Amino acid sequence: MLALRASHPGAASAFIGRYIEHVKRVVVRVMNVDPEVEDIVHEIFLDALRSIDRLKDPEALKMWLTSIALFKARRVLRSRRRRSWLRITAPDELNRFASAGGGSDVAEAMRCTYLVLNDLPTDERIAFALRFLDGMELAEIAAVCRTSVATIKRSIEVSVGIRRAP
């Protein structure tokens, strides 16, 4: 982190190389396979590099970067929802990202999952994707979303259709 702040040659490349797969995974889990993922990831790293001086705790670097990714994905999803052109990824595009061992069953499961996720409000979609697709713990989701565990629990409950009795 000190090397990034000092604009050390190669520090930005090393930073991106270390975290790019994590950021891509988070963005794809939240947004689905999307032709803009590469551009979004690029913007996330630009935002992170521009604001590296705001990070106080070097141990929180990965969580901080995940937060930037989530807020960028949220902005894109909300913008798309306002313009009503969220699209469903074609199955042939999903097949490119399905694991080699999973084949078309994995692609079909992903397609069905994102059909449901596309109808959820953005915050519920993010909470669901991070919990059930990425396997993050509730406290970790709350930290990267900068909200409480109770809020994340409520978002997940809404996303899976659980209603509490009044």
Image (tube, rainbow, N blue to C red):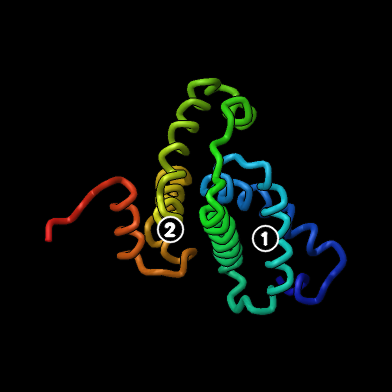
The answer to whether residue 62 is seen in the rendering is no
As helix, strand or loop, the secondary structure at mark 2 comes to: helix
**Badge 1 amino acid:** Ile
| In-image side of 70 versus 10 (left or right) | left
Query: Under tag 1, what secondary structure?
Result: helix
Which residue is labeled 2 in the image? 123
Q: Is residue 153 above or below residue 98?
A: below
Could you tell me which residue is drawn at 67 percent across and 42 percent down?
35
- Give x and y (percent) for residue 3: 78, 71
- Left or right of 37: which side holds 79? left
Q: Which residue is mark 1?
A: 44
Q: CA distance from mark 1 to mark 2?
A: 19 Å
* Residue displayed at 82% across by 72% down: 7
Residue 155 spot, x, y in % from top left: 34, 57
Q: Residue furthest front?
A: 83
Q: Residue furthest left?
A: 166
Q: Mark 1 and 2 residues: CB-CB less than 8 Å, in contact?
A: no
52 lies left or right of 125 = right
Query: Looking at numbered disc 2 in the image, what kind of residue is underneath it?
Result: Asp
| Foreground: disc 1 or disc 2 | 2
Residue under the image location 61 percent in, 50 percent down: 22
